C-alpha cells in the first residue's frame, strides 16, 4: 500500500464536498509528475491525506481512499472547463485522474505550521522548500505520525 497527500483549495472543493458526493473524480491535475503518480504508482486501496491549500490555515483535514484505476480526465476535452487542454489528443489523452472516496474528517486541521514543528517529518515532501505539487507521496512513518497527531477523529 502507498500513502499520499492530495491538495485541494477548500473554496473550490472541500473534504465536506467529498463526504457528500463520494466517490468523486480527482480531476484537473496538470503536472507530468502527478500524472505519472496517478498512472504508474498509485493503486486502488491506497490512502491519501486530504490537504487544504491556499487558505487561511493550510494543512491536513482528513483521509480518503483511492478507489479506481487511472483513466482519462474528461475535463481536458471540455472547452468550458478551467482544466481544458486543447493540445491533448482524444486518441492518446495527456491527463489522467483517479476516483477517491471519503474515509474520515479530522476534528481539526493539522496545520502546515504544526507539521513543521515535528522533527520526524522534516523530510516530508509538503514541507520541502519550493514544493508545489498537488499530489505527493507520504512515507509509512509520516502516515503514522500524522494519524497520531490527528487525535480524536470526527
Image (spheres, rainbow, N blue to C red):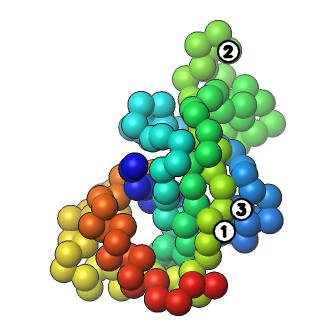
Per the image, the residue denoted by label 2 is 90
Q: Is residue 102 left or right of residue 147?
A: right
Dot 3 falls on a residue whose secondary structure is helix
Residue 70 position (above or below residue 102): above
Nearest the viewer among 17 and 150 is: 150
Nearest the viewer among 68 and 116 is: 68
Q: Are marks 3 and 1 in contact (CB under 8 Å)?
A: yes
The picture places residue 29, in percent across and down from the top left corner, at: 55, 42
Dot 2 falls on a residue whose secondary structure is loop
Quadrant containing the C terminus in the rendered view: bottom right
- Residue 53: mark: none
Marks 2 and 1, how far apart at CA: 31 Å
Nearest the viewer among 75 and 119 is: 119
Per the image, the residue denoted by label 3 is 18
Dot 1 falls on a residue whose secondary structure is helix
In primary-sequence order, the first of circles 2 and 3 is 3
- Residue 15: mark: 1
The picture places residue 51, in percent across and down from the top left corner, at: 51, 67
Q: At x 57% / y 32%, what residue is drawn?
A: 70
Viewer-side label of 2, 1: 1
The picture places residue 9, in percent across and down from the top left corner, at: 61, 64
Amino acid at each position: 500500500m502507498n500513502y499520499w497527500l492530495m491538495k485541494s483549495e477548500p473554496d473550490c472543493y472541500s473534504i465536506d464536498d467529498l463526504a457528500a458526493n463520494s466517490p468523486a473524480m480527482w480531476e484537473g491535475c496538470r503536472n507530468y509528475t502527478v500524472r505519472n503518480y496517478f498512472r504508474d504508482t498509485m493503486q486502488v486501496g491506497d490512502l491519501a491525506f486530504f490537504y487544504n491549500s491556499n487558505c487561511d490555515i493550510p494543512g491536513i483535514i482528513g483521509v480518503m481512499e483511492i478507489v479506481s484505476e487511472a483513466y482519462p480526465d474528461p475535463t481536458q476535452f471540455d472547452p468550458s472547463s478551467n482544466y481544458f487542454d486543447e493540445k491533448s489528443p482524444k486518441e492518446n489523452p495527456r491527463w489522467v485522474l483517479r476516483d477517491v472516496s471519503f474515509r474520515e474528517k479530522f476534528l481539526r486541521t493539522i496545520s502546515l505550521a504544526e507539521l513543521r514543528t515535528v522533527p520526524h517529518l522534516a523530510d516530508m515532501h509538503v514541507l520541502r522548500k519550493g514544493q508545489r505539487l498537488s499530489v505527493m507521496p507520504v512515507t509509512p512513518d509520516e502516515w503514522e505520525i500524522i494519524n497520531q497527531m490527528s487525535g480524536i477523529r470526527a
